[in-house]
Amino acid sequence: MPTPAANADGRARYVLVMGVSGAGKSTIGRALAERMGGSFIEADDLHPQENIRRMSEREPLTDADRWPWLKAISEAAIAEMNKGGGPVVIACSALKRSYRDVLRQALSPLSIVHLSGPVALIRARLGERHTHFMPIELLDSQIETLEAPDEEEGVSFSIEDSQAHIVAGALQAMGFSRHGVGEA
């Protein structure tokens, strides 16, 4: 995968931490935002109530359900960038390239950090979550929907690696280790 996108000073403005539910997007995203001195957006917090209801009832979302959500994510990220100057790290499944294209159109440059791993590990993680609206029963539909960002700018990490390894690798790929950000 090519090196993630960066602005003129070599740093990412927007970072998308993507993958299926249970991959660790929020954990890695928060850690990256903290280490980069930026802000963090949890895309799940921006789902319309109807989307949450549907997922809670074990009904997969359609593309039509996701377009307004992706627009809300983009608007929130731009507002956050305007407040703090960035970078803005977004934890969002962004399972299809078309979803990432919507984000990329609004948020430039957009670096991608893709988290993936064994289905058994992801299932185990989802089984331990009791407060999230995304049920384990929808994991298979997410895996079927996933279009890995193989040809897009970004980096991929196995969730079998430690959080410290993933964060350090993502920071290095985005040029932050060269700009005074300490090691994980």
Image: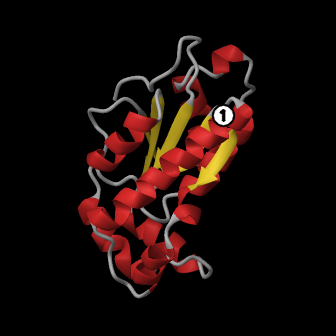
Q: Can you tell which quarter of the image residue 59 is in?
A: bottom left
Which residue occupies 24% across, 64% down? 144
Quadrant location of the C terminus in the rendered image: top right
Instruction: Please name the residue that numbered disc 1 is placed on.
Output: 82
Q: Residue 12, position in %: x, y?
A: 55, 26
Q: Residue 78, position in %: x, y?
A: 57, 39
* Residue 85 sits above or below residue 93 on the image: above
Judge whether residue 160 can be spotted in this image. Answer: no
* Residue 111 sits above or below residue 128 on the image: above
Which residue appears farthest toward the bottom when viewing the image? 57
Quadrant location of the N terminus in the rendered image: top left
Which residue appears farthest toward the top when viewing the image? 8
Q: Nearer the viewer, residue 156 or 102?
A: 102
Q: Can you tell which quarter of the image residue 178 is in?
A: top right
* Residue 140 sits above or below residue 172 on the image: below
In-image side of 174 versus 39 (left or right) = left
Instruction: Count neighbours of disc 1 (C-alpha within 10 A) and say few if under 14, some if 14 to 19, many if 20 or more.
Output: few
Task: Name the image colouring.
Answer: secondary structure
Q: Nearer the viewer, residue 84 or 39?
A: 84
Q: Residue 171, position in %: x, y?
A: 60, 29
In-image side of 37 versus 102 (left or right) = right
Q: Residue 64, position in %: x, y?
A: 29, 64
What type is the residue that disc 1 sits on?
Answer: Asn
Q: Nearer the viewer, residue 160 or 85?
A: 85
Judge whether residue 68 can be spotted in this image. Answer: yes
Which residue occupies 62% across, 33% down? 168
Which residue occupies 72% across, 29% down? 183
Give SS at disc 1. helix
Q: How many marks overall?
A: 1
